Image (spheres, helix red, strand yellow):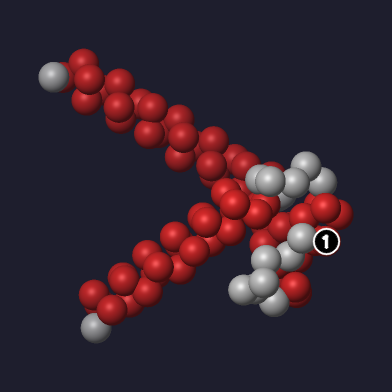
Amino acid sequence: MYDLISSLRRIYNVWRARLHNEHYLKWSTDAQRREHCPKDIDPEQWSWLIGYWGSAKFKVWTTYIFNRLIYVLIIKCLLN
């Protein structure tokens, strides 16, 4: 059961990442993003995601993840 939940979580996260990379980042303003809602998502859900991806909380989190990744890569390179 745990494997199923993990797989579904991973599929969902990949789907959201694809939406962010291919549809959210393509446009520079929220109005443009709302006009170009992907066909495979409900416009109300798309508006929520636009608000989430534009929030300070998301931006801080992604900055933290990026910085952590760089730190880990530097440490691994130094140890090898």
Disc 1 marks a residue whose amino acid type is Glu
In this picture, residue 8 sits left or right of residue 46: left
In this picture, residue 16 sits left or right of residue 35: left
Quadrant the N terminus occupies: bottom left
Which residue is at 46% across, 68% downward? 12
* Residue 47 horizontal/vertical position (percent): 75, 65
Residue 57 in view: no
Quarter occupied by residue 9: bottom left
In this view, the residue farthest toward the right is 31
Q: Which residue is mark 1?
A: 35
Q: Is residue 9 above or below residue 69?
A: below
* Residue 64 horizontal/vertical position (percent): 49, 37
Q: Secondary structure at mark 1?
A: helix
Q: Residue 34 versus residue 13: which sits nearer the camera? A: 34
* Residue 7 horizontal/vertical position (percent): 31, 71
Quarter occupied by residue 69: top left
Q: Is residue 25 above or below residue 66?
A: below
Which residue is at 38% across, 27% downward? 70
